[in-house]
Amino acid sequence: MVATVVIPAFDLRAALRLRPGVQARPAALAPLPGTEPLIGSVTGAAEAAGVRPGMRLSEALATCPRLELVEQDPASAEQAWEEILRRLEDAGFAVEPDSPGVVYFDTRGVERLYGGLEPALKRALAAVGTTWDPRVGAAERRFAALAAASVARAGQALIVSNDRASSFLAPLPLELLPLDQDRYAELEELGVRTIGQLAGLPGGAVAERLGPVGRRAWSLAGGEEPGERKVAPRRPAVALHETLEFPEAVGNELTLRRGLAVLLERLLARPERAGRPPRKIALWARLVGGASWRRTVTLREPTTDLGRLRSALQPKLTELPAPALKLRVEVSELAEHRGEQLELVAAEGMVLQGRLREGLRQVRAAVGAGGVSTVVEVAPWSRIPEARALLVPRDD
Amino acid sequence: MVAHTGGARAARSARRLNSPRPALVEAHADGLPRRVNRQDVALVREEWRVVDRWWTDEPVHRRYFDVVLESGENAVVYHDDDAASWFTQRA
């Protein structure tokens, strides 16, 4: 069977992780600057007050004047989602993430592991964590599993057997089908409000009126899944990261570049890498005011060359919207092979570097972790002496 | 697959290099240092002011003195006008 774990309004929940009190109040995700003024996900209290996701901001505020707008935090959401996926993977589920808040997995392997389908689904809910109010649905087909998870209560595991999939789907609202907003409105005008009513229409007529998208929705409503594919689990991501915490917010590019260079050096020295070059690297920053920022770079050619890694990541630093309090470099994917020609003669300076590394290793052994630091000049022009350079510990 | 090591390697804080240290300074009425860390000042070689970050919550108002002590040792001390305290620092 295919199982789907759904966390409703995941982006809003992620943005409110540090402000749990707001979840009980009417709140909505604010639109991103420069985009159409439509609100995002809303809390239960906002929904009860008549606010709907996708509403115009002015309309939402007129409907509920007490509505609190929550700034979007896509980097935190991405991080939280990755943590959830890792917990599921640690529990033995080979997951295929669909979008933040929706993940599929095949239950065949884990049913035996946990002694049946229901215990496995309960284990998946426990792995996600009760704070996210997850729900899980299982069925023979993806859409039925998604629909089951979408209508389940928080913490509930809903299993839909193949023989009652059609009857289960029939009374559910059309909104569960992947259709544009205009199509929903069109169908509602025609008096079609449930999946069962759509399934009852002739397929040819639906295709003529709504096109291929409508035809696909009609097939899904009837319990079929055109072009259905198996669950394709992702390759578990690696978790190598290095973080630098600045004593004060840093906005100038030179300081950030130097911080980035130190982080890359540390990352390349990590033994877990086992000589494999990074293929995908993410740059993350905690900004002044609490917001976060993240950019991902996929290298065309995996490399361990510090200069090339810096050239790939440095341009991203110019996109930082505010001064940073923390800077982190994460390796999300490592390449399998180095694919580099070994050198016949060691490059000049390698012997000295080796001696230096050995000397530093001995110092660390004598004085303990944190005994060796790198001096990073961050603002040599500053009139305040202590602002000119930082001591960055290195334990590599 | 690589083991998750995030917990063991938490964010390590960078520290400031050349942070000021409190100094024991006796000063003349005009603010010039007379004794630094229990040693008489033989000569004030240079004096300068640093006023910075006045637009932040942590403004900097310092009066620096580059002094030669009786023992021949060089020292840089400053008076922090906001904290009303003396500090020593390599300038």
Image (cartoon, grey):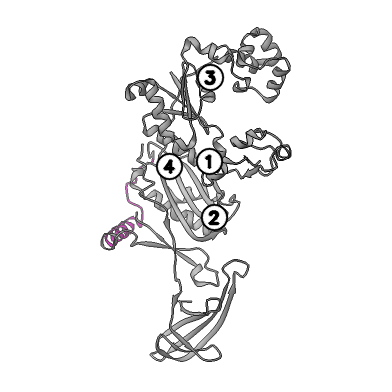
The residue nearer to you, when weighing A127 against A205, is A127
Which of disc 4 and disc 1 is earlier in sequence? Answer: 1
Same chain for mark 3 and mark 1? The answer is: yes
First along the sequence among labels 4 and 2: 4
How much space separates mark 1 and mark 4, taking CA atoms?
28 Å
Q: Amino acid at mark 2?
A: Ala
Asked whether residue A93 is in view, the answer is no
Q: Residue B5 location, x and y as percent?
A: 36, 45
Percent position of residue A13, x then y? 54, 39
Residue identified by numbered label 1: A14
Q: CA distance from mark 2 to mark 1?
A: 20 Å
Give SS at disc 4. Answer: strand
**Amino acid type assigned to the residue bearing label 1 in the image:** Ala
Identify residue for label 2.
Answer: A324
Quick check: is A22 in the magenta stretch?
no
Would you name the residue on which mark 4 appears? A278
Q: CA distance from mark 4 to mark 3?
A: 36 Å
C-alpha gap between disc 4 and disc 2: 24 Å
Q: In the rendered structure, which segment of residues is drawn in magenta?
A: A340-363
Please give the count of numbered marks on the rendered protein. Answer: 4
* Tag 3–tag 1 contact (CB < 8 Å): no
| Distance of label 2 from label 3 (alpha carbons) | 42 Å
Same subunit: marks 1 and 4:
yes
Q: Earlier in the sequence, mark 2 or mark 3?
A: 3
Q: Earlier in the sequence, mark 3 or mark 1?
A: 1
Q: Around disc 2, counting alpha carbons within 10 Å, would you say few (fewer than 14), some (14 to 19), or many (20 or more)?
A: many
Residue under circle 3? A143
Chain of the residue where label 2 is placed in the rendered structure: A
Q: Residue visible at 47% across and 78% down?
A: B87
